[in-house]
Image (cartoon, grey):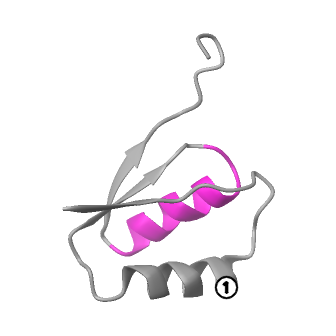
Amino acid sequence: MKYLLIAGSRTFSDLETFDQVTRRVIGNETEITIVEGGAAGADSLARDFALENGLQIKEFRLDCDNY
């Protein structure tokens, strides 16, 4: 299993660029887990991409109370 961490701005919303770059990075890999932080912007695009493409997701939300 390989992992791809996707992180970025909470205001990022360019779906076309996100899709093109993510597909280029993943290539033909099918056993990949998308790692994201559960926020708006790049994280939500990552989650949607994973769901639409049948990929696994690991979400690590920000823990403001402890860090």
Amino acid type for the residue under numbered disc 1: Glu
Q: In the rendered image, which quarter is residue 50 located in?
A: bottom left
Please count the marks in the image: 1
Q: Quadrant of the C terminus?
A: top right
Compared with 50, 67 (above or below) is above
Question: Left or right of 16: which side holds 22?
Answer: left
Compared with 56, 15 (above or below) is below
Q: Main secondary structure of the magenta part?
A: helix
Residue linked to disc 1 = 16
Instruction: Kindly identify the residue that appears in the image at 59 percent across and 30 percent down.
Output: 62
61 in magenta: no
Residue 41 percent coordinates (x, y): 70, 56
Q: In which quarter of the image is the N terminus?
A: bottom left
Question: Left or right of 37: which side holds 34?
Answer: left
Looking at this view, name the residue that lies furthest to the right. Answer: 11
Instruction: Kindly identify the residue that appears in the image at 28 percent across and 88 percent down.
Output: 28
Compared with 40, 67 (above or below) is above
Compared with 49, 21 (above or below) is below
Residue range in magenta is: 39-53
50 in magenta: yes
Looking at this view, name the residue that lies furthest to the top. Answer: 65
Q: In the rendered image, which quarter is residue 15 located in?
A: bottom right
Q: How many neighbours does mark 1 have within 10 angstroms: few (below 14), some (14-19), or many (20 or more)?
A: few
Residue 58 percent coordinates (x, y): 37, 46
Instruction: Kindly identify the residue that appears in the image at 81 percent across and 56 percent down.
Output: 11
Q: Is mark 1 on a helix, strand or loop?
A: helix
Q: In the rendered image, which quarter is residue 53 located in?
A: bottom left
Instruction: Kindly identify the residue that appears in the image at 26 percent across and 80 percent down.
Output: 29
Residue 36 percent coordinates (x, y): 50, 50
